Image: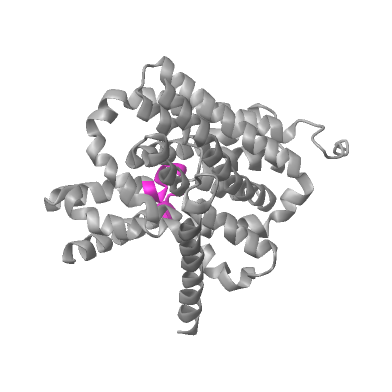
């Protein structure tokens, strides 16, 4: 029972941050989506120590484990796009395949090439 | 109201069943969103109400994408040491990877003659689904199409990414974590954690930052698509 109460309070905390972000977003110079503003706001609160990870950690873990659940309904909306998928599905798949591979290669290459502000790694034994 | 509750129950049931199948047969191909989405589609079609009857449940669940996205700050903060140690490299890989994925997708889509809303949706695909969905309107794409493309992209990235990285000689946890987190968001992070704790930590930082990178790059993308 106590665990459920703690979890409910933590979820309420995440909702509160999201609501503040929704109120804040229209006043920002950049048109970022409010959920992303909420993420950055919470990161700031955690970094400054105003909010502790232990206050929200369990709820955050729960959301991350089940993140997919929350966008299932939007994916279900694809039902209305049957003709679009039949018409362009293969081309979409091709574009996704090529650009995903290119992005992974680029990020992986930048992630391993030497000389980006770190000392070179010790030679392998 | 009853319809909303039925839709909620249906979605929870489909998701729970998908998780169960995924646990018994772990593979990117059994990832829960890939199984539960068609289950719900079939069920609401058979029930005869279709998307219209599902709207209440859909809105109720989608509302939670806000707090769910906010929660991504926790792993970002927990693994902030990655940023302190490799800040320049992390930023370069996230921005570079995001930019390459976006430019390749939009350019290829144009060459193939796909229309602007599809080009836009493809451009957003490396962000985590809730953020990509939130950006859909801004670039003139449809949210369900964006969601489908993000899922397909995360799936392909998770299946092909590790082998591709090995082939390219990317063996360090840093390189692999950055690539998987930047391009394949949640699925990529899960895959990265299967490779190791450090790889996973790096991927979760990359995923959160990639969402910011896609959101910032969505501005020039929207302007570019409006102009052409």
Q: Main secondary structure of the magenta part?
A: helix
Residue A66 in view: no
Q: Nearer the viewer, residue A48 or A60?
A: A48
Residue B68 in view: yes
In the displayed structure image, the side of residue A1 where residue B212 appears, left or right: right
Q: Is residue B30 magenta?
A: yes
Q: State the image coordinates of residue A20 (x, y, percent, origin top left).
A: 50, 63
Q: Residue at x 49, y 84 (%)?
A: A2
Q: Quarter-wise, where is residue A1 in the image? A: bottom left
Q: Quarter-wise, where is residue A93 in the image? A: top left
Q: Residue at x 27, y 49 (%)?
A: B39
* Rendered position, A22 above or below B106: below
Q: Is residue A57 magenta?
A: no
Way the structure is coloured: one colour
* Rendered position, A46 above or below B101: below
Q: State the image coordinates of residue B24 (x, y, percent, origin top left).
A: 42, 54
Residue sitting at the far left: B48
Q: Nearer the viewer, residue B26 or A55?
A: A55
Q: How many marks do you count on the picture?
A: 0
Which contiguous range is marked in magenta?
Answer: B22-33
Q: Residue at x 53, y 57 (%)?
A: A38
């Amino acid at each position: 029972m106590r665990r459920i109460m703690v979890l409910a309070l933590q979820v309420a905390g995440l909702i509160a941050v999201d609501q503040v972000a929704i109120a804040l977003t229209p006043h920002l110079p950049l048109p970022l989506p409010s959920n992303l503003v909420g993420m950055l706001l919470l990161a700031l609160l955690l970094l400054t120590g105003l909010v502790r990870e232990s206050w929200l950690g369990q709820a955050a873990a729960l959301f991350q484990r089940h993140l997919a659940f929350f966008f299932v309904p939007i994916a279900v909306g694809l039902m209305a796009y049957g003709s679009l998928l039949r018409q362009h599905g293969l081309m979409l798949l091709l574009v996704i395949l090529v650009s995903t591979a290119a992005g992974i290669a680029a990020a992986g290459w930048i992630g391993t090439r030497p000389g980006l502000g770190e000392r070179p790694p010790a030679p392998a034994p | 109201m009853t319809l909303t509750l039925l839709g909620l129950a249906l979605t929870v049931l489909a998701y729970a069943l998908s998780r169960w199948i995924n646990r018994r047969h772990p593979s990117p191909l059994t990832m829960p969103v890939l199984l539960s989405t068609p289950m719900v589609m079939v069920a609401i079609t058979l029930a005869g109400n279709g998307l219209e009857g599902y709207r209440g449940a859909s809105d109720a669940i989608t509302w939670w994408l806000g707090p769910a996205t906010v929660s991504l700050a926790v792993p970002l903060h927990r693994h902030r040491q990655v940023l302190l140690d490799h800040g320049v490299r992390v930023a370069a890989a996230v921005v570079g990877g995001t930019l390459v994925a976006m430019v390749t997708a939009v350019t290829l889509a144009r060459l193939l003659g796909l229309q602007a809303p599809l080009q836009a949706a493809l451009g957003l695909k490396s962000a985590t689904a809730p953020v990509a969905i939130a950006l859909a309107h801004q670039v003139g794409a449809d949210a369900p199409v964006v969601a489908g493309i993000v899922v397909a992209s995360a799936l392909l990235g998770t299946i092909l990414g590790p082998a591709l990285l090995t082939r390219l000689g990317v063996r360090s946890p840093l390189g692999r974590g950055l690539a998987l987190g930047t391009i394949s968001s949640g699925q990529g992070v899960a895959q990265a954690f299967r490779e190791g704790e450090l790889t996973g930590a790096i991927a979760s930082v990359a995923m959160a930052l990639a969402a910011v990178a896609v959101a910032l790059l969505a501005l020039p993308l929207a302007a570019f698509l409006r102009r052409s």
